DNA sequence: TGGCATTCTTAGGCAAGTGAACAAAGTAAG
DNA sequence: CTTACTTTGTTCACTTGCCTAAGAATGCCA
């Protein structure tokens, strides 16, 4: 019965979470500032903060300058109070991350394989990987909150696992969450890579609490994670932000989805690489990622044809970003994922230009565009942040969490 | 101090609202079903429902069949318990609506003018209009919750009023909300027409509580109102759903916003009418709406050129709808507003086709598309629903309400 | 040293929600 | 008709989160 319905009582623990979230976002903050930011009374802040300190989550670190009276006591998250583990499953391999409460990376490593192997075996391998590294790094296992697992593609309602149509066929009906929970003995959360990346940025990037932004994630495909006011926007079937199939050219090339001119078919890494091949560029990489990387390097060196191909892609991604910003009224777009890690600086100016022009002309607020500071492993970091978020700031006001249900269903 | 900060305590009165909303959505429902739907205890439901009955908002109407024990007592909203007034300001004129709690229209009328007149005078005229009709229809003034006023265009942060750049220049800095509140003595809410239309559909259309849908509103411009789980999605500056300037053709005609190929420039009523003129069609209407209407009628009669023009427009709007559905993961798109009232049946098949194809191919859930049952006055009905929503189901969990602030600022 | 301003804490109270016992109103079996 | 059982709805004592109000702590300035 534990997870039957969130109920409205779930909004109760929210002030604790909200305060924790504000401390995280501010880095260092005093109780008075917390009262202003939350709208709660000083009394309430006092007791809640006391409990956070008792729980070891928050530290009092020195005092601020006096403003004429008693100086404020400064509060901060204790980064090493809790940890979370993030795992990013991809076709090419598995990326692991151990992050602390501050969102900082404590350990990070990568192993090849996964895609075509037997799920059972992969679960065992992941469990072993995590166990050995946790002991090696010396993180207290009791302080580990849980495990976040992300992968590309939309989310299946039945298993709760994301599934990529072409690859990883054998994963489709496998209860990954339940299996991992049993193998590791920690709570497991599953989500889409783009969504996770957005949460990762929010948690570690010092983004303010009341903002609306999207993480535009380009890996093999293109997706977007949307965060509004500290909460993930999921939509009706948890597949919001599927920007890969928005149409940017009515008469564009046909996409496997049945329509024409989808962003992914026109401007995704696979499309760019294919276009390069068509243009006669010799590419020696083993997969799309490697080839896209060498194209990006060639463009950076100033080679005309690669440059042109990437700029073409950037134009379309600019349209996608503008569309996102228009529909969702965003104030920030973050470019992240392996593809932007390789070629972000080539995409940024075009996307910035497009957003700046449109919104300036209409007298609207500007939309900032930045490149993530840890774009290559953004999804894995996000997976860890997913756990931090759900354990420490679970303010899904009235929104059901479809990702946890499958775990319980399959566990029984 | 009343409206300084919503605070977290604002989430408190929510169970009453949530229950009211469930009763509204269900039409008729029992207490047991309410416990299941909310996750609250039977005890809580009992007391809250008791209070709703005492307040006259809810009625006990008969009992259901027994399922082996005591039969359930059925609950229903009392439609005539409260009323709300909706006003839609447009370039061409003002549409008024009086709606009851059930979202049903009690009175509806329309007056020309507004746009270029003196705001002060318009306010006086509106107040007089409302007073006379309220007494004529025989609605108890004490049962009127308030007044919703909507108009096209984005929302200004300074006055809280929407402002359309080209027309209605004199309204830009006028504190409409405060002036109307004073003139009528009722709370006034201001909002965008598309957003209001969405709330109107939600309130009167029997849309289920936990859904995500958008109202695609086509009047003079094109906008969208987005509702998720009974709450308006507003974005960072309350301008979410500005679909008019999403790009559907990178090499399309230039738009005044500085980019090319915006939906509004390609497919809005004004664009369709302009294209018809260019094609040599003789149009005698006084404004875009009339001309668009005669084009729609001509297309319905089977005239080739108008048909072609409208189908072209429909293709672009299909792209916009698909984009919305993709980004927001919608399950329903409602076509509404004067333009769809005139030509909805010409647009529907194309939009349906496009959404069906894309989502079916990707194995995702289908997206329904329907035409609003009261498309012509959707905005005015929505304006009234705005009041019902804010008074009876204000579950803006943690979201600030920028629209009420200006009223207080300018009132002081 | 004693105001004075500012920050933080403690104490009492209100309101929403819960759990558990109970009352009410039916069906099913003898 | 009586008895047992099921389901619905209510009452009541208790917990919890927050608020108001008062006070304690800790600095500045005269």
Image: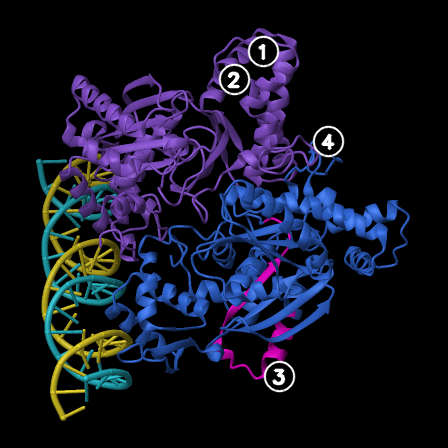
Chain colours: A blue, B purple, C yellow, D cyan
**Label 4 vs label 3: CA separation?**
55 Å
Position of B91 relative to A102 (above/below): above
Q: Position of residue B264 (x, y in %)?
A: 56, 30
Horizontal placement of A252 versus B329: left or right?
A: right
Residue at x 73%, y 31% (from the top left corner): A251
> Where on the picture, by quarter, is residue B55?
top left
Label 2 resides on the chain identified as B
Does residue B208 appear to the left or right of A275 in the view shown?
left
Identify residue for label 3: A136
Residue at the spot of label 1: B299
The segment highlighted magenta reads A126-154
Local SS, label 1: helix
Identity of the residue drawn at 76% across and 50% down: A310
Residue B326: percent from the left, percent from the top?
57, 40
Q: Which x, y percent locates residue B34?
A: 29, 43
Q: Which residue is mark 2?
A: B343
Residue B160 vs residue B102, the one in the foreground: B160
Q: Nearer the viewer, mark 2 or mark 3?
A: 2
- How many neighbours does mark 4 have within 10 angstroms: few (below 14), some (14-19), or many (20 or more)? few
The reply to whether residue B49 is visible in this rendering is yes
Q: Which element is circle 2 on?
A: helix
Answer left or right for B210 relative to B78. right
First reached walking from the N terminus: tag 4 or tag 3: 3
Q: Is residue A135 magenta?
A: yes
Which residue is nearer to you in this view: A355 or B409?
B409
Chain on which label 1 sits: B
The answer to whether tags 3 and 1 share a subunit is no
Mark 2: few/some/many CA within 10 Å (<14, 14-19, 20+): many
* Discs 4, 3 touching: Cβ within 8 Å: no
Q: CB atoms at circles 3 and 1 under 8 Å apart?
A: no
Residue on which disc 4 sits: A251
């Amino acid at each position: 019965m534990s997870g039957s319905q969130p109920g409205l009582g779930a909004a109760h623990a929210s002030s604790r979470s909200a305060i924790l979230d504000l401390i995280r976002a501010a880095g260092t903050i005093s109780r008075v500032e917390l009262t202003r930011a939350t709208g709660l009374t000083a009394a309430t802040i006092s007791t809640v903060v006391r409990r956070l300190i008792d729980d070891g989550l928050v530290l009092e670190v020195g005092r601020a300058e006096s403003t004429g009276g008693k100086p404020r006591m400064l509060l901060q998250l204790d980064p090493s109070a809790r940890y979370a583990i993030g795992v990013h499953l991809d076709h090419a391999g598995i990326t692991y991350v151990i992050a602390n409460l501050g969102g900082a990376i404590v350990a990070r490593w990568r192993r090849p394989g996964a895609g075509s192997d037997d799920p059972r075996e992969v679960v065992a391998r992941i469990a072993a990987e995590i166990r050995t590294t946790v002991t090696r790094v010396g993180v207290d296992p009791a302080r580990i909150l849980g495990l976040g697992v992300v992968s590309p593609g939309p989310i299946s309602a039945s298993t709760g696992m994301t599934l990529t149509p072409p690859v990883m066929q054998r994963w489709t009906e496998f209860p990954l969450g339940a299996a991992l929970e049993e193998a590791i003995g920690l709570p497991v959360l599953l989500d889409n890579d783009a969504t996770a990346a957005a949460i990762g940025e929010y948690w570690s990037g010092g983004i303010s609490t009341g903002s609306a932004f999207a993480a535009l994630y380009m890996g093999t495909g293109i997706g977007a994670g949307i965060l509004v006011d500290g909460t993930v926007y999921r939509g009706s079937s948890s597949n919001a932000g599927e920007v890969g199939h928005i149409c940017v050219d009515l008469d564009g090339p046909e996409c496997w989805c049945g329509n024409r001119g989808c962003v992914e078919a026109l401007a995704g890494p696979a499309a760019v690489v294919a276009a390069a091949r068509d243009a006669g560029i010799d590419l020696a990489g083993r997969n799309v990622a490697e080839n896209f990387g060498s194209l990006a390097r060639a463009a950076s060196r100033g080679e005309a044809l690669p440059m042109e191909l990437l700029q073409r892609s950037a134009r379309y991604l600019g349209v996608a970003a503008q569309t996102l910003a228009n529909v969702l009224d965003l104030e920030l777009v973050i470019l992240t994922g392996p593809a932007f890690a390789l070629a972000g600086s080539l995409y940024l100016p075009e996307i910035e230009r497009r957003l700046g022009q449109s919104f300036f002309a209409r007298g609207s607020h500007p939309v900032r565009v930045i490149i993530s500071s840890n774009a290559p492993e953004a999804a894995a970091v996000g997976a860890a942040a997913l756990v931090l978020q759900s354990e420490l700031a679970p303010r899904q006001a009235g929104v059901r969490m479809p990702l946890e249900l499958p775990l319980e269903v399959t566990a029984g």
